[in-house]
Amino acid sequence: MNLENLSTEQRNSSTEGLDSMSVREILEKMNEEDLTVPKAVNEVIPQLDVIITKAIERMKSGGRLIYIGAGTSGRLGVLDAAECPPTFGVDPSLVIGIIAGGEKALLEAIEGAEDSETLAADDLAAISLSAKDTVIGIAASGRTPYVRAGLEYARAHGSLTASLSCNMDAIISKAAEYPIEINTGAEVLTGSTRLKAGTAQKLVLNMISTSVMIGLGKVYQNLMVDVKATNVKLQHRARNMIVQATGVDEEKAATYYNQANENVKVTIVMILTGMTYEESCERLDSAEGFVRKAIK
């Protein structure tokens, strides 16, 4: 499909006078258009359910979640991956964001990187891609050669593959086992897919990583109990989570937290079961890290 035929490249008839609008009018129009994005994302929830469920199964067996993209799409994947270690306490190697052109491309455009048919394979080979991994190719246009080639390489190596685009009948959909196509339509600013398309991609990536981490036992109730408390704010949040999960006062929460070597999950199990630190650790291990299972 030619670029000019993509829905994300069409002119938005309601914003053709964009340059003559007041700032207030621009803001209201952008907000009006943004309100259509969650509805478009809602349409792909059934597909996301299947992909995420399969990804969790693979990750429990030692697989990884890998995002691959170029430009804005690549940056969004890298951003989502980078948030997983501090939020969920996982190793940085569990969720990986790969962008065409490497780290330099996070700050500036790298000429020709997204058009490369070979660079994606090199990038995936560099992280020792395996059949246990899940690879999600991200491209708003749905036609980026780098992403398509990456999905083809991943599929040939037995990885679970999914694509995320904001056009229907996308080229990269044909390269993935599980395509996700979100019809975000014409942008406020013609062709600027960092807007509605980028918002849709961010929403989907939020859903993928959060659901995956819940499925791996990184959440208790709605609390991120595996958070790495690496600063004063997060230390306070950790103790507050213990209070919220167990009902004890702040002083008791802090005491148990120290006894548990500042591990929120172990602290919660200790308080709710009356077990020792060692017993709580063993119970969590046998429950595969799920607090809810450990306290039964």
Image: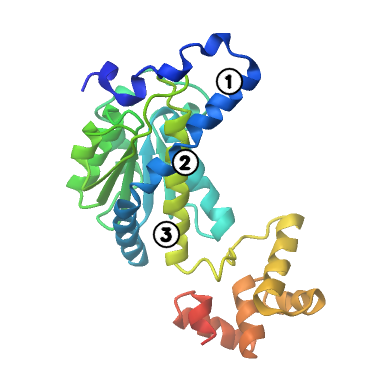
At a point 38% along the width and 24% down the height, the residue shown is 186
**Disc 2 and disc 3: Cα gap in Å?**
15 Å
* Tag 2: amino acid: Lys
Badge 3 density bin: few <14, some 14–19, many ≥20, Cα 10 Å: many
Q: Which mark is residue 26?
A: 1
Taking 273 as reference, is 164 left or right?
Answer: left
Badge 1 density bin: few <14, some 14–19, many ≥20, Cα 10 Å: some
Residue 35 place in picture, x, y as percent: 49, 37
Badge 2 density bin: few <14, some 14–19, many ≥20, Cα 10 Å: some
Q: Secondary structure at mark 3?
A: helix
Q: Which mark is residue 202?
A: 2
Dot placed on the residue nearer the N-terminal end, 1 or 3: 1
Farthest right residue in view = 251
Dot placed on the residue nearer the N-terminal end, 2 or 3: 2
Q: Is residue 287 above or below residue 177?
A: below
* Tag 3: amino acid: Val
Residue 137 place in picture, x, y as percent: 32, 40
Callout 1 touching callout 3 (CB < 8 Å): no
The residue under label 3 is 212
- Kindly report which numbered mark, 2 or 3, lies closer to the viewer in this rendering: 2
- The reply to whether residue 93 is in sight is no
Taking 179 as reference, is 89 left or right?
Answer: right
Taking 289 as reference, is 136 left or right?
Answer: left
Relative to the observer, which residue lies in front, 217 or 142?
Answer: 142
Farthest top residue in view = 20
At a point 60% along the width and 82% down the height, the residue shown is 269
- Kindly report which numbered mark, 2 or 1, lies closer to the viewer in this rendering: 1
Q: Secondary structure at mark 2?
A: helix
Q: Is residue 40 above or below residue 261?
A: above
Taking 212 as reference, is 29 left or right?
Answer: right
At a point 56% along the width and 81% down the height, the residue shown is 281
